[in-house]
Structures are given as C-alpha cells and as structure tokens.
Image (cartoon, rainbow, N blue to C red):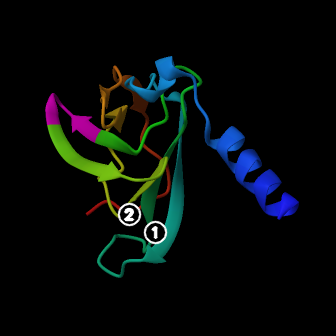
Amino acid sequence: MLVRILFVLLSLLLAWQPASAQHAAPGVPRALTFSWKKDYKDPNCLGNPPVCKLSLSVAPSMQGAAATSYEWEIWRLGNIELSKITRGTTWLIGYLEPTDTYTVKVRAVNACGSSPELVRTVASPTGCCIK
C-alpha cells in the first residue's frame, strides 16, 4: 500500500506544471534544421540522379507551455507550396523542385494558442533529380 501511495505522489509530482504554464500558448520553436536526403532514382531524370526528400526538424521551445502540434508552411517565390500540421517536431517532404530556394515557417500550437513563427531559408541541394 505504501508503495502505491508513493507511486501516485511521484506521478503527480512529475505531471505538475506551474499555473502559468498550464494555461499558456507555447513559445517559439528553436533550432530549425534541414537536410536533403537522397532517395530512389527516377528513370525520367536526365543522368538518373536520385530524387531528394527534404527533412525538417525543430527543437521544442523552452518558453511557455508544451506544444501539442506544429504548423508548417513552405513558401517559394512568395507563394505557399506546401503546408502541414504534425504532432511531432519533424516533417519529411516527398519531393520539392531542388533548383529553388524555399522559406520554411513553423509555429508551435496547443489548446491555448500558437507561438510566433520561426522562419528559415532552405537552400537547394546539389546532385538531385530535376523534373
């Protein structure tokens, strides 16, 4: 019985958040990183280079409350190309034209609101399929 009481108390202690963090929007995500991952070869591409996938990742904010999802946008030439909501901090995009520079915007979201956007420019890779 004593072990059960200690377990319940420990669980409550680990789940506790200050009142200010319980009813707040998350802070801005940190450290937006990207990488181009070479995938399959497309026979329709001149020279048969691989198709490259873009992998995006952020670190959760150390400010505000925890995020429950992330809203992503990929912009090219002033227009939104893609958008997605993810539960985690990573998004793998199947195909983007590798000759362009993209602007990636991401914000953290929870039931109380969303953070300001974190914005980063993503340069095009080399050696990837161009359709």
Decide: marks 2, 1 in contact (CB < 8 A)? yes
**Hey, which residue is sitting farthest left in the picture?**
79
| Residue 120 in which image quadrant | top left
| Residue 107 in which image quadrant | top left
Residue 16 image point, x, y percent: 61, 35
Q: Which residue is mark 1?
A: 49
Residue 26 image point, x, y percent: 43, 27
Task: Give, as a three-letter code, the residue at label 1.
Answer: Pro
Q: Nearer the viewer, residue 66 or 13?
A: 13
**How many numbered marks have been drawn onto this rendered protein structure?**
2
Up/down of 7 relative to 104, above or below: below
Residue 122 image point, x, y percent: 42, 35
The mark that comes first in sequence, 2 or 1, is 1
**Observer able to see residue 64:** no
- The residue sitting at 43% across, 60% down in the picture is 53
Measured in 3D between alpha carbons, the distance from the residue under mark 2 to the one under mark 1, in whole angstroms, is 5 Å
Query: Magenta residues?
Result: 73-79
Up/down of 47 relative to 75, above or below: below
Which secondary structure type mostly characterizes the magenta part of the structure? Answer: strand
- The residue sitting at 52% across, 64% down in the picture is 38
Label number found at residue 129: 2
- The residue sitting at 86% across, 58% down in the picture is 2
**Hey, which residue is sitting farthest front in the picture?**
1
